[in-house]
Structure formats: structure tokens, C-alpha cells
Amino acid sequence: MVSRNIESTSKVPTFHVIREVYDSSNAHERFEAELDKALEAKLDFIVIEPPRLGDETGRWIWVGNCLHKTAVATGVVSLVASLLWRDRPIIAAPACALSIFCTGLYTVSWNYDPCCQYQVENNDTVLEKLPLTDVSSPVILGYSPNSKTKYLHRSVSLLSAALCAWQIWRSYNRFVHSAGSG
């Protein structure tokens, strides 16, 4: 959910409505091009009328959010497991691997997509303030800069990977030294 308060800003929120008008055989491509232009313009709100485009965009954002949250959660689990069970990297390693995988996938697929800076807006207070009188069942995207959250999940993943690698290295050294002296 976007934490945007329209009243707290002095400027009028910018928005664009992608109308569901099928005037040619390639209307869906036109809708996508219109969405791309609106995303690149970083408008405050984008209202998507065509249901197929709205559903696809909403799912794309949902999957990106899921990857981000999974990366952070598994990174934190890996960090906690590394701190609780210092001599057992096997407990933290799977969570760390999943965190690194999700972070990598997010970075490759979502990081440079302007759509990742939007969230599906569900806040009724915000929606009531938008001029949506002649719009039929839209999906509304609200601009929400995400550079801090991207740095958070990258930092958590890298920190958990570093701690996990250190634990594995330490365990390996203990194993080698105990095998050599026995």
C-alpha cells in the first residue's frame, strides 16, 4: 500500500488515465505503450482501465514485492540463525542462499523496471480524492520511490552472505585442523 497523503503536499497530484478504448486491433499494445510513458514520467498516480493490463501490472508488482520481502525475511532469518548457532552454518546457509537468489532475481528483473516504483493503491482515503467519476473498475498505481528498500534488501542479503561465508570458512578450518591433529 502506498503511504501517500494527498492533503499533506502542496502540489496537486499528477495522474494519467489509461482509457479502455478498443479502436484498433493492436489496442493492447497501445495500452502498454501508454503505461510505459506514464511510468517513465513518474506520475503520482496511474489509473489503468483495461482489465487485462491492470491485472498483469498488478501481478508484476505483487511478484516483485514478494521477492523483495522474501529476500529481506530470509536474510534476517539467516543472520539470526548465524548468531544463534555460530558453529552450525548448515542452519543459516539455506536461508542465506534463498535471500541471495531472491535479491539477484529482483535485481535482474525488477531493479531497472520503472514499474517497481509503483504500488497498487488500495487506500480508500487516497482513492476518494482522485477524480475517478468516469472510470470503470480501474487498477490504480501510486508512485512510491523504493531506493531505500532496495538498499535494505541488498544490505541484508550481503550481510547474511558474508556472515554465512565466514561461518563456513571457520567451520572448514576447524574441521581441517581437527582432522590433521587426529
Image: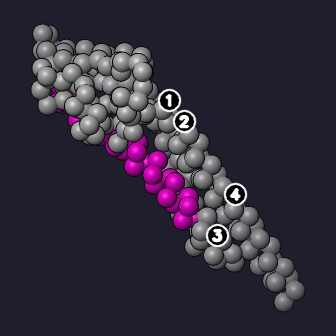
**x then y, percent, for residue 149:** 52, 43
**Quick check: marks 3 and 4 in contact, CB under 8 Å?**
no
Assess whether residue 73 is covered by the magenta stretch: yes
Give the class, few, some or many, for how many residues have Cα within 10 Å of label 1's Cα (few <14, many ≥20): few
Q: Which residue in the protein does label 2 denote?
A: 147
Q: In the displayed orientation, state which residue is furthest to the bottom.
A: 182
**Mark before the other along the chain sequence, 2 or 4:** 2
Q: CA distance from mark 2 to mark 4?
A: 22 Å
Tag nearer the camera, 2 or 4? 2
Residue positioned 24% across, 18% down in the render:
17
Mark 2 vs 1, N-terminal side: 1
Disc 1 residue type (three-letter): Tyr
Does residue 73 sit above or below 51 in this rendering? Answer: below
How far, Cα to Cα, is label 2 from label 1?
Answer: 11 Å
Badge number at residue 162: 4
In this rendering, does residue 121 appear at all? yes
**Mark carried by residue 51:** none
